[in-house]
């Protein structure tokens, strides 16, 4: 049942995806952020909206890259990149730096769902695909639900907004490593998949 581990790790990916996506919504409300950067409301709005601009724009190209080069390497790269850009956001000292970091986060996260759905198609038999897709989506929704609470807790515990982003980025890099170790782009490439599971995956 290697395919179940694949879905489990992909749920972790979706969790950190949404955590890194939503955390800025809480960070910009914190006193440590506002006392540090002193942005206008208009600048804050642009920072928050920047992610979704590149995220929407790059989904098709990022999905194509995963089809072309394989889900395992590309989604690992995407996780590493958005984790790096999340951590980099914590080093920003100006509106321009924040804006650039969030634009790049959107670029990196754009391929996550197209790639994960391609993995579901390759790894999961047709009869289980709706459940598998729902589980991946659930991982993201859990991340989105917990993101405000975890972000506030980290800011309060660590004393500033920057550290919370560095921690989020570090967790993402750990998940990228786990993803690389567990996942393969197709069942035929995985050393732990036996003939019975390959036959099951191929059934409609």
Image (tube, rainbow, N blue to C red):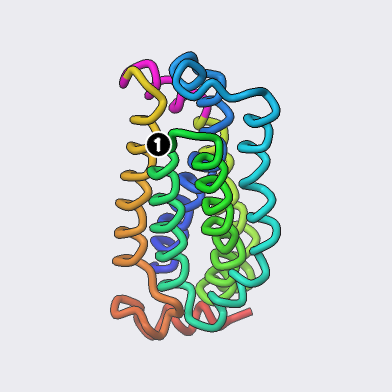
Residue 152 magenta: yes
In which quadrant of the rendered image does the C terminus lie? bottom right
Residue at 61% x, 37% y is 47
* Side of 28 where 126 appears, left or right: right
Residue at 33% x, 37% y is 167
Q: Which residue is identified by label 1?
A: 90
| Element type where label 1 sits in the image | loop
Frontmost residue, 40 versus 70: 40
Residue at 58% x, 40% y is 141
Q: Which region of the structure is painted magenta? A: 148-158
Expressed as whole percent of the image width and height from the top left, the position of residue 202 reads 55, 83
Q: Can residue 4 be seen in the rendering of this structure?
A: yes
Frontmost residue, 139 versus 100: 100
Q: Quadrant of residue 170?
A: top left
* Side of 110 where 172 appears, left or right: left
Main SS of residues in magenta = helix
Expressed as whole percent of the image width and height from the top left, the position of residue 26 reads 54, 25
Frontmost residue, 197 versus 36: 36
Q: Mark 1 Cα within 10 Å, few/some/many (few <14, many 20+)?
A: many
Q: In which quarter of the image is residue 73?
A: bottom left
* Side of 42 where 101 appears, left or right: left
Q: Quadrant of residue 150?
A: top left
Expressed as whole percent of the image width and height from the top left, the position of residue 136 reads 55, 53
Residue at 33% x, 66% y is 180
Number of numbered discs visible in the structure rendering = 1
Residue 187 magenta: no
* Side of 20 where 51 appears, left or right: right
Residue 121 higher or lower than 94, as above or below: below
Expressed as whole percent of the image width and height from the top left, the position of residue 33 reads 47, 22
In which quadrant of the rendered image does the N terminus lie? bottom left
């Amino acid at each position: 049942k290697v395919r179940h581990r694949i879905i489990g790790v992909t749920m972790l990916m979706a969790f950190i995806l949404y955590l890194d996506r939503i955390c800025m919504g809480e960070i910009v409300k914190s006193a440590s952020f506002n006392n540090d950067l002193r942005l206008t409301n208009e600048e804050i709005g642009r920072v928050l909206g920047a992610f979704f601009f590149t995220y929407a724009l790059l989904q098709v190209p990022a999905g194509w890259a995963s089809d072309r080069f394989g889900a395992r390497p590309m989604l690992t790269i995407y996780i590493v990149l958005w984790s790096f850009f999340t951590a980099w956001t914590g080093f920003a000292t100006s509106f321009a730096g924040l804006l650039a970091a969030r634009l790049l986060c959107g670029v990196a996260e754009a391929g996550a769902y197209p790639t994960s759905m391609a993995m579901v198609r390759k790894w999961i038999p047709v009869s289980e695909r709706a459940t598998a897709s729902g589980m991946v989506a659930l991982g993201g929704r859990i991340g989105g639900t917990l993101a405000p609470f975890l972000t506030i807790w980290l800011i309060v515990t660590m004393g500033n907004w920057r550290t919370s982003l560095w921690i989020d980025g570090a967790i993402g890099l750990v998940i990228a490593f786990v993803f690389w170790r567990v996942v393969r782009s197709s069942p035929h490439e995985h050393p732990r998949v036996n003939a019975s599971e390959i036959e099951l995956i191929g059934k409609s």
